[in-house]
Image (cartoon, grey):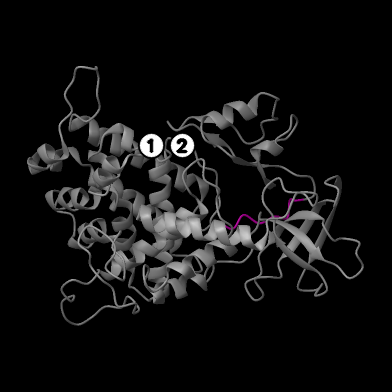
Amino acid sequence: MIQIALKELRAGHVLAKSIYRDTGEIMLSSGYRMTGDVSTKLAAIGIDRIWVWEEGLNDLEYEDLVSEVTINQGVLLLRKTYLDFRSKLGLIRTNSEEVIPTPEQILAKPEQIKEAMNVVAFRKVAADIFQELKKADPSILHMTGSRSTGNFYQQQSIDCAIVAALLAKRYNFDPDEIEDMILAVLLMDVGLALLPDNLLNPSAKLSLEELELKKKHPDYGFEILRACNVSLICANVALQHHERQDGGGYPRKLTGSNKPPVRTTGPASKGKINRYAEIASVALDYVSLIAPPPGIDAQTPINSIKFLVRLSGAKLNSSIVETLLAMIPVYSAGDRIMVTSDPSGELKGYVGVVLRSNSREQNRPAIALIYNSAGEKIPLIQINLWERKDLEIREAKLGETAGAQATTQEEHQDIADALADALVDAS
């Protein structure tokens, strides 16, 4: 199988992974043979890439750390829990004349919040993720998958929980602490549930006033979780996951020490970011790069590394970033690549995908070439790059061919600067 951009989809392609609607029903099942009108329907629900079967790519290894079934079930359970919570609090309008309570009015009734919030559902999702991650190797972080607009925040929270859990595992957190980390990250954006509907669209362009209201969600989340008697760890992650090392974050302007997030013998220093929240911040910024809101281009692992380095120290805990960088594979199974150097000149410009990553030499994976330099389909060529030291590759965007205009170094830098600034502003 191979991941393709939606613009590459052609009638006759056979779907390799099922596509789900926001409500959980299967829209298209694995094995479905695509027709000409499918692209429009997929674009309408925010899908920009899909997995299809490709002759000769049966050896492509699916390397995600948590199964697609577990993630999808978790997303749907979290979605239902959030909708039920908002409904019980009167936040879902049933007619145009209905008055929606303000967050402050809701927070003034902690007993109502406690009754409305189903924390057990979050614990179940956390436990399911933890069980699958227990057997995972924390040395390499593999994450792929398609996303739709409607469940963006739920998908993002699960992705962040996986990254945060592996970071905690690398720092030798004990099993109970790792499960606490997962639960805390799943709950860290619960304060968003008190906001108006128009602020919950991840692709919406918000006014300055709306942005300021959205930036109150850490305070709201803290109050919700304390009302529900959830652990102080979870409440602090909800409160502090947008704090920055230099004190430039919100809502408390806390600072960090850029030290490893290890347990201390005494109480946390006043004015300092909680160690769990520091991990959550790094996980959130990484996931925001590789799986951004619909309409924003996802960054490749290499570009993600560059952005994280730019944020390290002043914004993100440099020790945690350094640990994460060692986990991010340069190439993962399914990544699109292009041959950039071949002494014989025969394969230069050929485009293909990574079949298997290589943990020992991350820049020398096993690849399969699918298109020639003219963008024409060719009989598949499999190559183990650790055996072909004369070949060099680079990442290629979905749908890119050798004839596409290359992005200049200056354009790369402009994109890097803009995205890094956007991440800081959004946080």
User: Image quadrant of residue 383?
Assistant: bottom right
Q: Is residue 392 left or right of residue 256?
A: right
Please report the residue visible at 14 percent of the width from the left and 53 percent of the height from the top.
226
Q: Are marks 2 and 1 in contact (CB under 8 Å)?
A: yes
SS under mark 2: loop
Q: Please tell me the numbered disc located at residue 201.
A: 1
Q: Amino acid at mark 2?
A: Thr
Q: Is residue 274 magenta?
A: no
Residue 258, placed above or below residue 120: below
Instruction: Identify the residue at image location x=36%, y=71%.
Output: 314
Residues in magenta?
Answer: 57-63
**Residue 176 in the image: above or below residue 297:** below
The first of marks 2 and 1 along the sequence is 2
Which residue is at a point 67% across and 51% down the rendered structure image? 397
Residue indicated by mark 2? 149
Q: From this viewpoint, is residue 11 visible?
A: yes
* Callout 2 crowding tier (Cα within 10 Å): few <14, some 14–19, many ≥20: many
Does residue 100 appear to the left or right of 74 in the view shown? left
Q: Position of residue 421 (x, y in %)?
A: 43, 58
